[in-house]
Amino acid sequence: MQPEIARSEKKVGSQIAGQIWVDGYSDTFLNMLGEAAARVVCDKAFETVVKLWLQMLDNDHRLKLKNAANIREALLLFVEISGRTGLFEWLENIELKEGSDGLCIGIHGCSRIDRCREIAQSGKELRNLPCPRIGCSRALLSQLTGEIYSYTLKSVDAANRICKGVLAKR
């Protein structure tokens, strides 16, 4: 007889499954299509993921994210709702700083950090890599502000388990 799985364990399991799918698709596209094409395909996928997530929030949880006045407000709103719903839980570990290129975003404890380090060490440029965490943040910003944003992955620090990038209006 199998032990009963607690609801919270199922929720964590579904988060992990979702993360594995997003990460798996990102890696597969990168391996099959190369950097430039993978980035385009993944960025479109991140937009779809965010659009579906926003619809689910509205339909299943009656939570509707309001439009944001600026990039920082939009991201902080995203972080708040993500924490309340348990989705995109990694957002609880971000840092935001204004920079000359745009809003600098640091993601602490990203589960992909070792994989990104390996990819970067293989000779691929970080700025061309699809990043599910920063890419989903970019997609949300575009949805909430009505502006078009881009992102660039700037650094991967595996020792301190933090990746950094920049979100900027196009």
Image (cartoon, rainbow, N blue to C red):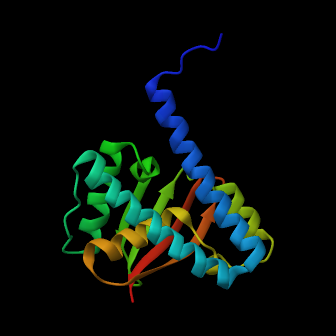
Residue 16, given in percent of the width and then of the height, sits at: 57, 43
Residue 37, given in percent of the width and then of the height, sits at: 66, 83
The C terminus appears in which quarter of the rendering? Answer: bottom left
Write the residue at 70% across / 65% down: 27
**Which residue, as the protein is rendered here, is positioned at the far bottom?**
170
**Could one spot residue 42 in this view of the protein?**
yes
7 up-or-down from 148: above or below: above
Write the residue at 18% across / 74% down: 69
The N terminus appears in which quarter of the rendering? Answer: top right
Q: Is residue 59 left or right of residue 167?
A: left
Residue 15, given in percent of the width and then of the height, sits at: 51, 43
Q: Is residue 44 left or right of residue 69?
A: right
97 up-or-down from 36: above or below: above
Q: Residue 7 or 115: which is nearer the viewer?
A: 7
Write the residue at 41% across / 53% down: 91
Q: Quadrant of residue 76?
A: bottom left
Q: Is residue 43 left or right of residue 59?
A: right
Residue 138, given in percent of the width and then of the height, sits at: 42, 72
